[in-house]
């Protein structure tokens, strides 16, 4: 497990405890923060490396999108995250009328810890 800055899963803000930035303390927190950051980064957004990020504008947030393609893109992005050993589940709830896409997932980390997450598009 690596250490990284802890990102609050509800507000997506860094947390400060006793005048110090909070760090992740276990594999579950570390991998959750890593997955959250990766899935919230749009392709080309980061000025240091414009080749990383999910291709939301290019392939996901457009008219007449193929939902199977969206599922493949997101699940592959999760599976290819450092620290993820296996994608256990990837569930999708899609409303065709509102074009509301919600996904949840569960992964196993390299050390056997189970981590879950999800988001809405």
Image (cartoon, grey):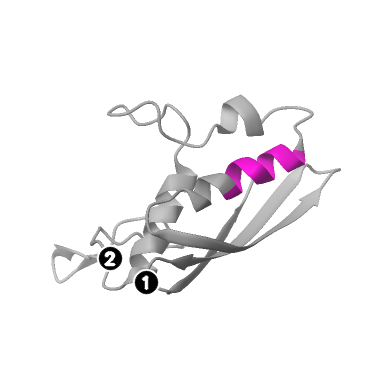
Percent across and percent down for residue 31 are 39, 62
| Quarter-of-image position of residue 66 | top right
Spatial CA span between label 1 and label 2: 8 Å
Numbered mark located on residue 28 in the image: none
Q: Which residues are magenta?
A: 67-75
Q: Which residue is mark 1?
A: 111
| Quarter-of-image position of residue 63 | top right
Residue 70, magenta (yes or no) = yes
Percent across and percent down for residue 53 are 45, 36
Q: Secondary structure at mark 1?
A: loop
* Quadrant (top left, top right, bottom left, bottom right) of the C terminus: top right
Residue at position x 47%, y 30% in the image:
43
Residue at position x 80%, y 44% in the image:
98
- How would you rate the neighbour count of disc 1 (Cα within 10 Å): few for under 14, some for 14-19, many for 20 or more? few
Q: N-terminal of the two: label 1 or label 2?
A: 2
Question: Is 82 placed left or right of 21 in the picture?
Answer: right
Numbered mark located on residue 1 in the image: 2
Query: With respect to residue 69, does 58 lie above or below?
Result: above
Residue at position x 56%, y 46% in the image:
76
Marks 2 and 1: in contact by CB < 8 Å?
Answer: yes
Question: Is 102 placed left or right of 17 in the picture?
Answer: right
């Amino acid at each position: 497990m690596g250490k990284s800055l802890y990102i609050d899963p509800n507000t997506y803000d860094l947390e400060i405890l006793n005048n110090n930035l909070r760090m992740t303390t276990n594999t579950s927190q570390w991998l959750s923060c890593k997955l959250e950051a990766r899935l919230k980064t749009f392709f080309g957004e980061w000025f240091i490396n414009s080749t990383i990020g999910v291709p939301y504008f290019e392939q996901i947030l457009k008219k007449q999108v193929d939902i199977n393609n969206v599922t493949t893109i997101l699940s592959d992005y999760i599976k290819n995250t450092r620290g993820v050993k296996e994608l256990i589940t990837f569930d999708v709830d899609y409303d065709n009328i509102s074009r509301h896409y919600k996904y949840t997932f569960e992964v196993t980390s390299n050390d056997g810890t189970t981590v879950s997450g999800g988001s809405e598009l």
